[in-house]
Amino acid sequence: MRLVYFGSGAFGLPTLRWLSERHEIALVVTQPDKPAGRGGRVSPTPIGAFAQEHLGGMEIIKPQRIRDEDVVSRIRAVESDAWVVIAYGQKLPAGLLADRFAINLHASLLPRWRGAAPINAAILGGDTTTGNSVITLADRMDAGLILGQSTRAVEPTMTAGELHDALASDGPELVERVLLEKQRGTLRPIAQDESLVTIAGKLSKDDDDIDFAMPADFLRRQVLALTPWPGISVSVVPAAGGAVVMGFKVLRVKTGERRQDDPGQRVGTLVDARRGVVLCGHGSTLELLEVQPPGKRGMRWDEFARGAGRALESGGFVLVASREAQEPGRRGGGD
């Protein structure tokens, strides 16, 4: 088939690679190059970079506004059998889509988790199964007809980054299946059940907060859902008060054994430094599995404990959100 591909984010890379090896990519449409990284160097999107490096001679356009008339005319002039849209970043206008077969790969089992951050929402929501959906494009976000779906288990210690990569790797075969069914005339679109719609809101840097007064299972889901971005940063402070001892990012956790409630023990207390066990709300505990000290790679807690963690073995330390440590008194310390 002859295809036009719209995409910007890394989620669509496996599918673009797959399609380029089995079909003719007539045009790649991606977002404009933008400053990225600490140096602010202007760089192409992941899709733009891949197309430039691996699809030599391929026409690539990077419009600031996809709805501009000259852009619409240019894209519509390209002969194609189908358009594939994955994490493009701009809403495609009705005038562009008119009488074109266009499909979108979305990282959830629609109608669950429409919106900007479905992978994070699935983990935070406690879903044990998620997947991908291929849908038609509609005026409302992610509300198109379902053309195909695939499923994947959400493991108890799987981060959003890992789930992102797993779902991205599932995308190519699902998109290919839908394209072939369209070609054979066997495609059977299914309308979404609006009564089952849930929304996955956009994440921001302000979502990096953590409150150890919450139950450990909620905190497990929160940490995993926000890794690698925006991430959860904590500071270690003496329980009796005083300056921050150290800080690190929490990358991976699991729920631990329940403890007897001790009204005198503050939530966030590191009750077992060797194993990285933290007291949470209502006697629940969280076990730190992987952390990342500032300026260093991520590491298992036992690696960390052999070094910097030894300073914590004397006891009497509490973990608090780094933002809370910077603003003492912002949140109460009880559970």
Image: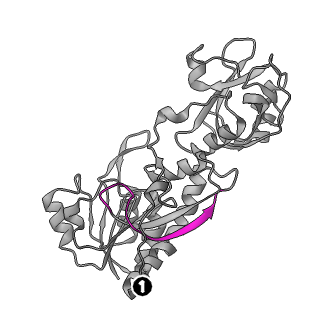
Identify the residue position indicated by label 1 in the image.
186
Residue, far bottom: 184
Considering the numbered disc 1 on the image, is that residue within a helix, a strand or a loop?
A: loop
**Residue 170 placement (x, y as % from top left):** 54, 68
* On screen, residue 235 above or below 192: above
Residue stretch in magenta: 138-154
Q: Residue at x 70, y 34 (%)?
A: 215
Q: Is residue 6 magenta?
A: no
Q: Residue at x 35, y 58 (%)?
A: 88
**Residue 290 placement (x, y as % from top left):** 70, 42
Colour scheme of the rendered structure: one colour
Q: Residue at x 56, y 45 (%)?
A: 228
- In the image, 309 versus 5, the foreground residue is 5
Label 1: few (<14), some or many (≥20) within 10 Å?
few
Q: Quadrant of residue 236?
A: top right
Q: Please state if 13 lies on the left or on the right of 303 as rendered.
A: left
Q: Quadrant of residue 99?
A: bottom left
Q: Please state if 197 lies on the left or on the right of 30 as rendered.
A: right
Q: Residue at x 21, y 64 (%)?
A: 96
**Residue 214 placement (x, y as % from top left):** 67, 31
Q: Please state if 258 lies on the left or on the right of 204 as rendered.
A: right
The quarter in which the C terminus is drawn is top right
Q: Is residue 140 magenta?
A: yes
Residue, far front: 195
Q: Amino acid at mark 1?
A: Thr
**Residue 68 placement (x, y as % from top left):** 16, 56
Q: Please state if 30 lies on the left or on the right of 18 as rendered.
A: left
The quarter in which the N terminus is drawn is bottom left
Give the number of marks.
1
